[in-house]
């Protein structure tokens, strides 16, 4: 089961290219819904509320931001499927979990 702060490589809905996503809420006990955010390369126009630096996550090799505007709700059963399919592709907790900032 994924826990808050865990990350997984997934495509954005409707796209093929995979991006790094982080689980930022625990699943709701009733609905099983939880929120994941997309982590993306920092650009001049980026929201810099949360910046992840190289070395804070095995996948991050340049300043990376949490793209809060692209947050998505996922169901608990999706997390189990993500873990099975992507465990060999980079399911890693960050050293400095974005949710703790």
Image (cartoon, rainbow, N blue to C red):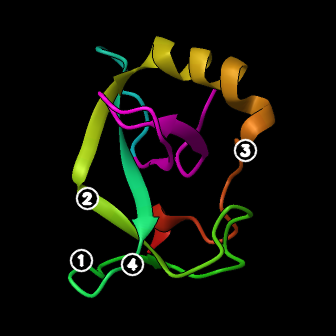
Point out residue 98 in the picture as x, y percentages from the top left corner.
48, 66
Secondary element at image label 3: loop
Secondary element at image label 1: loop
Q: Are marks 2 and 1 in contact (CB under 8 Å)?
A: yes
Q: Read off the residue under disc 2.
A: 68
How far apart marks 2 and 4 lie (CA) works out to 13 Å
First in sequence: mark 1 or mark 3?
A: 1
| Label 3 packing within 10 angstroms: few (<14), some (14-19), many (20+) | some
First in sequence: mark 2 or mark 3?
A: 2
Residue 47: mark in rendering: 1
Point out residue 95 in the picture as x, y percentages from the top left corner.
70, 68
Going by the image, does 22 lie left or right of 48? right
The quadrant of the image that shows the C terminus is: bottom left
* Closer to the eye: label 4 or 1: 4
User: Which of the 4 quarters of the picture holds residue 83?
Assistant: top right
Identity of the residue drawn at 29% across and 14% down = 31
Magenta range: 1-24
The quadrant of the image that shows the N terminus is: top right
Q: Between residue 18 and residue 52, name the one nearer to us.
A: 18
Residue that extends furthest to the right in the rendered view of this protein: 88
How far apart marks 4 and 3 lie (CA) works out to 20 Å
**Above or below 87: residue 8:** below
Going by the image, does 66 lie left or right of 7? left
How far apart marks 2 and 3 lie (CA) works out to 21 Å
Residue 11: mark in rendering: none
Point out residue 55 in the picture as x, y percentages from the top left corner.
72, 78
Q: Read off the residue under disc 3.
A: 90
How far apart marks 4 and 1 lie (CA) works out to 8 Å
Q: Per the image, is 15 magenta?
A: yes
């Amino acid at each position: 089961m994924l826990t808050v702060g865990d990350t997984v490589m997934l495509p954005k809905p409707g796209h093929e290219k995979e991006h790094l996503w982080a689980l930022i809420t625990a699943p709701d006990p009733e609905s099983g819904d939880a929120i994941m955010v997309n982590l993306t390369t920092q650009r001049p126009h980026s929201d810099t509320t949360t910046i992840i630096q190289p070395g804070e996550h095995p996948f991050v090799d340049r300043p990376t931001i949490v793209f809060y505007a692209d947050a998505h709700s996922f169901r608990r059963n999706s997390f189990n499927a993500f873990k099975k399919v992507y465990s060999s592709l980079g399911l890693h907790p960050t050293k400095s979990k974005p949710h703790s900032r």
